[in-house]
Amino acid sequence: MLPIRGELRWSWRRHILIACAVALTSGAGCGGGSGGGGGLPDPIDVPAGLTVHCSAAFDGGKIPLNTFIDATVADDVCLIHRFDATQGVQYSVQVLIAAGGNVDVLVASNGDFIDLVTASNFFGDTPESATFSAGATQEYVIAYIGRASTSDISTRVVQNIPSPTGERDCMATVDGGELSTDGTPVSDIVFPRTCVLYTFEGNADSIYKLTATFAGDTLPDALHVARDRDLTDVIDSRVFLEETTTLYPVTDADQTFYIVLVGEFSELSTYELALTRGNAPVGLFDRCHMAEDSGPITTDWSPITASLARRTCHIYALSSVADLLYVIGLTTSSFGTPPELRIASDADFRNLVTTTTEPVEGISGEAFVAGSAQTFHIAVLTSALDATIDYDIRGLESEPPPQGLTFPCNRSRAAGSLVADGPTFNGTLMANECATFTLDTLGGVSYTISALPNAGSVFLYASQDAEHTQSLGSSVNFSGPQGLSFTAPTTGTVHIAVAGRIDGTAFSVSAATAAAPPAGVGSYCDFAVDAGVLTVDGGPASGFAAADQCNLYAFSGTNGTSYTIRLTEVDNDDPDLTLASDAAFSAIIQEATTPDGDTIVFTASGDQPFYLAVHGFQSVEYTIEVMVSPSPPAGLAGRCSSVLDDGILVVEAPSVRQSAAPDQCVVYSFAAISGLSYTVTVFTSRGNPGLIVADGADFTSMLTNQTTSGGEVYTFTAAATQDFYLAVFAETATTTDFEIFVETP
């Protein structure tokens, strides 16, 4: 039950008796009938018009308007009140009846109740309400007729005002007065088919929170807020009310606004109204009542964690630098509708910033480029119906992507300068991020750029301009190293960009001077890069060649010495190899252009330098080494002129891939246990490999010598715990590529 304007009154179906108990049926005088309800009623003669309704009557005196008066009425007794009315004004007599009571109400224009103007006679303790318009300025009288042994009542006369024409359910309308903003809530009772009209002074571009709280089982029918009292210009409304109903009206002018509460058809309702003004920016009124200043947002993509209540917004500030890119990311772990992000160039959020959705480190963000150095305003808002949500918000400041590279990257950062034939730059990239470099070039000179990912994947671009609209080339293979070559059109600066395709991509990038290729390999490449001198038996050297590039090596050979040149692919690349006795590659000794890696075995014809060119149909990453080819052991002397020791095989390990050049045996060993059965398998992807299995390193005691076309399989049982030795060779004058593995069946 709610207090009604400071007084305690009857609630629906459950009332508290305040008036003194008067034994009206005893005829005892209570005195002081003229006290406006403040004293006890005096017995009077039953007015002529009431003789059919009651056997005794009491004068309760004159009562003021709009004030509840409490009394007790006995059965077959009439209690009389008087009040002053003004001609043409409408009035309502409202009576609350305590549970178990029952009264009827008659209103007349004279004291003998001959000229009745209205009546209310609901059964039982249903509230009574009688409405009429005064025909003259005079005193009107009310009779409360007891229909139960004792009826405790609380009654008032209210002066009605014209009903809003826009609400047809207002049979009578009570003036509730002005509802103060941020003041004490008002409480009252709205009777059936009655409306209560309040006013409040609204301000331009403001949002208000109107909270209506209802007690009891019956709710009013509607709650409206309008610019005019006739409800022809409603700004907020609710027709299905809840025990606590909240409206968020927005006012667009400094003027009086109107609130109308519409009572239910047949039941009264007890209510409390409270009005507060919000501080949300005008552009956020659709979601936000109160705004909280949450300070600056981060610019390094580190998260800020916060909780956001319904109809509250958090406002963050971003101090921008002209022409830089900003990305704002918003995530939540709460269930329900995700929070909304709005970015504006003004504090009122009237001018929203146009953004694009861009991912940063796996988080979707809203990106824009600042047109000037200024403060941007960022709002986080809940859905209109959601409760409190938890969220993370983060910001990133970066260079925008070059105009010509908006597809591979959504942001960039200047990473410095590359120097042709200078140091390698090592760095890290996230997905959709570009690292940009400059390279000083001489007109007419050729250059090659290599970008090698150590983890992740990259794209590579070169252009005459920083926005990459004048392309000099690109390398965008699906994965692996990227490389490109170009001839500088003028002396000046060119621009290089490496785009990350996977978060956490570690990469290296370098630039080298290139030249026209030697004539002998001109059909393989458009550019050549001097890759240096290889040391015989110095181990493998790593290299990378772009799709249109030859890498040139040299090594010193000794007359009559057999050498093995082994080119091994990295990540299934397909490098090719050319060997020549002169730098122009006009005297080519041998070429190997088979899939995967390649091997060349040859015997030097003199003490001189020899030259190698590594190239590929696409960009290739590889290792290359030059080794002296040892003579074969005694048991293989008739099969090959040199050997390549490829190491130890592990039983049940994955297969080993290798190539066997003509006239060279590739040898292996593996450890066996006595009594166990072993199977040696050789698969081929090119050529025809043979297989020799022996129990000694000199291969004089052979277990098998197989030359089956298409590959070899040999199974045997070890007679002792020892090492066994394998030799794979090309049965024809063509290099064979093979895989070999050992397993226990």
Image (cartoon, rainbow, N blue to C red):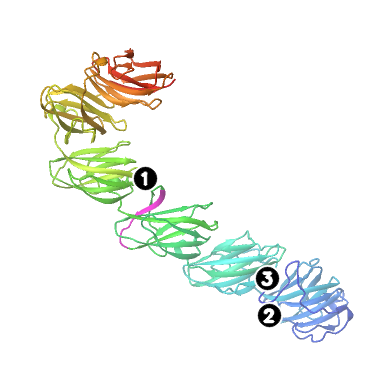
Q: Position of residue 322 (x, y in %)?
A: 29, 59
Compare residues 666 and 189 and report the one nearer the observer. Answer: 666
- Residue linked to disc 2: 86
Question: Which quadrant, please, contains the C terminus?
Answer: top left
Is the residue marked by circle 2 packed among few (<14), some (14-19), or many (20+) residues within 10 Å? Answer: some
Closer to the eye: label 3 or 2 = 3
Q: Quadrant of residue 100?
A: bottom right
Closer to the eye: label 2 or 1 = 1
Q: Are marks 1 and 3 in contact (CB under 8 Å)?
A: no
Dot placed on the residue nearer the N-terminal end, 3 or 2: 3
How far apart in space, not on screen, are marks 1 and 3 (Cα)?
Answer: 61 Å
Magenta: main secondary structure equals: strand
Asked whether, in this view, residue 42 is left or right of residue 194, the answer is right
Dot placed on the residue nearer the N-terminal end, 1 or 3: 3
Q: Position of residue 655 (x, y in %)?
A: 36, 25
Asked whether, in this view, residue 369 is left or right of residue 222, the answer is left
Q: Secondary structure at mark 2?
A: loop
Which amino acid is tagged 2? Thr
Q: Secondary structure at mark 3?
A: loop
Identify the magenta region.
363-373
Verify whether residue 372 appears in magenta. Answer: yes
How far apart in space, not on screen, are marks 2 and 1 (Cα)?
Answer: 83 Å
Which amino acid is tagged 1? Asp
Is the residue marked by circle 1 packed among few (<14), some (14-19), or many (20+) residues within 10 Å? Answer: some
- The numbered disc on residue 2 is 3
Verify whether residue 441 appears in magenta. Answer: no
- The numbered disc on residue 503 is 1
Which amino acid is tagged 3? Leu
Q: Quadrant of residue 556?
A: top left
**694 is higher (above) or lower (below) than 375:** above
Work out whether residue 262 can be spotted: no
